Amino acid sequence: MRRWRATDREPFAAMNADPEVMRYFPTPLTRGESDALVERIERRFELEGFGLWALEVAGTGEFVGFTGLNPMPPGLPGEGGTELGWRLARSAWGRGYATEAGRAALAVAFGEVGLDAVWSLTAAVNERSIAVMERLGMTHIASVDHPQVAAGSPLRPHVLYRLDLPGWSRAAS
């Protein structure tokens, strides 16, 4: 996990334009939307000192996605709290990177940031992300319709998970 570099923008945009990577989001992102997201991520680091870190493979430096801490979306349980999130390029799927990076982000959240709880959410049909949440020791809190996803969309039903500081352990598997 590291801060973003200018060289991350191209592979990030390619990842965000990949329909399979963006399967559980309403639409893939254009290059402009992807670049704007990097700008928002960087502003959060400047304001808060933490956010969504770029992920690279140790040894090769290959950019493979992001993980980190972000504000919970409005209109959902946990509003005003902090979300743990991730997005990985297809080449990085199934290698344990989301879980490894999630543990590192939780260490920051519960350590230097001093949070008492961290949330995570995904479309109810996103079994892979749900499995990561459970490997991280998170507990299912609610199933809700995401207010920012169109009614009738199969992506509208979401699940929310939470991990409280007393239940957190780096050894969660």
Image (cartoon, helix red, strand yellow):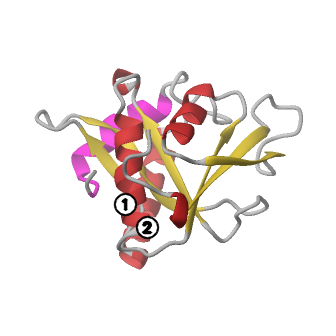
Residue 173 in the image, given as x and y percentages of width and height: 44, 38
**In the foreground, 31 or 135:** 135
Q: Is residue 52 visible?
A: no
At label 1, the amino acid type is: Ala
Residue 65 in the image, given as x and y percentages of width and height: 37, 39
The label shown at residue 64 is: none
Q: Magenta residues?
A: 3-17
CB atoms of marks 1 and 2 within 8 Å:
yes
**In the foreground, 67 or 22:** 67
Q: Can residue 113 be seen in this view?
A: yes
Residue 12 is inside the magenta segment? yes
**Is 131 situated left or right of 100 in this image?**
right
**Is 86 situated left or right of 154 in this image?**
left
C-alpha gap between disc 1 and disc 2: 5 Å
Residue 111, picture quadrant: bottom left
Taking the spot 44% from the left edge, 45% from the top edge, the residue there is: 172
Question: Mark 2 falls on what kind of element?
Answer: helix
**In the foreground, 146 or 133:** 133
Taking the spot 70% from the left edge, 27% from the top edge, the residue there is: 125
Give the residue pinned by disc 2.
110
Residue 36 in the image, given as x and y percentages of width and height: 47, 54
At label 2, the amino acid type is: Phe
The label shown at residue 107 is: 1
Question: Mark 1 falls on what kind of element?
Answer: helix
- Residue at the right extreme of this rendering: 152
Categorize mark 2 by other alpha carbons within 10 Å: few (<14), some (14-19), many (20+): some
